[in-house]
Amino acid sequence: DGGITQSPKYLFRKEGQNVTLSCEQNLNHDAMYWYRQDPGQGLRLIYYSQIVNDFQKGDIAEGYSVSREKKESFPLTVTSAQKNPTAFYLCASSIISGSADTQYFGPGTRLTVL
Amino acid sequence: QKEVEQNSGPLSVPEGAIASLNCTYSDRVSQSFFWYRQYSGKSPELIMSIYSNGDKEDGRFTAQLNKASQYVSLLIRDSQPSDSATYLCAVPNNAGNMLTFGGGTRLMVKP
């Protein structure tokens, strides 16, 4: 089955800890994205990557870091510098066609700070 | 900064009625638009995309685009309780590699 997987589904973090959220896709998509969604809100872009070993900051990158060592994988680390990390985190991917690229989403990771 | 605005709702309609969801955007050069549906606790799923002025129909869903008025809407005919969800409008940047999402409209279809 082709698709986007995210793990874990639920994650609990103590204050001061770094945690890493996994995102894997087997769709052979070039671009991958991380969004954050707070209750009752839309999606806000954290980071995106269009090619291996390259990524760009989105609107709310502070307190987050990413890597793109493989085309299939785009892990997100929530660092202790992110003061309010409790949220629903969504990973997405798309082809790069030169026009508007449809993004497809993984199932999400719900992060809670204890 | 591209802005995408949606009424947060909830929009409540009776089963079988037409639900009309609206989205306005601030960037005049946007060429395409996406509607996603998000059930509570789940991730967004693509319903429709529209690139040209006018209407685009897919089953019970119709997307309407008016670029001059910077307005895109989604009509759901014969609404079902299973349509109850939050509907997100998304607009790409000029390069097509980033989406800006509206805050979403919560739709409730009552039996």
Image: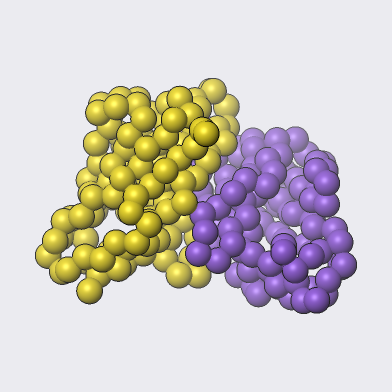
Chain colours: A yellow, B purple
The extreme front residue here reads: A1
Q: Nearer the viewer, residue A108 or A49?
A: A108
Residue B59 lies left or right of residue B73; in this view the side is right
Question: Residue A82 is drawn in which quadrant?
Answer: bottom left
Q: Which of A106 and B62 is in front in this view?
A: A106
The extreme left residue here reads: A16
Residue A79 lies left or right of residue A48; in this view the side is left
Check the image and report above or below for B93 versus A9.
above
Residue B53 in view (yes/no): yes
Check the image and report above or below for A75 versus A13.
above
Give the x, y percent position of residue B22.
71, 59
Residue A54 lies left or right of residue B81; in this view the side is left
The residue at 17%/68% (across/down) is A14
Residue B101 lies left or right of residue B22; in this view the side is left
Quadrant placement of the C terminus of chain A: bottom left
- Mark count: 0
Question: Residue A5 is drawn in which quadrant?
Answer: top left
The residue at 64%/64% (across/down) is B85
Residue B93 in view (yes/no): no
Give the x, y percent position of residue A51.
35, 25
The residue at 64%/73% (across/down) is B9
The residue at 49%/45% (across/down) is A105
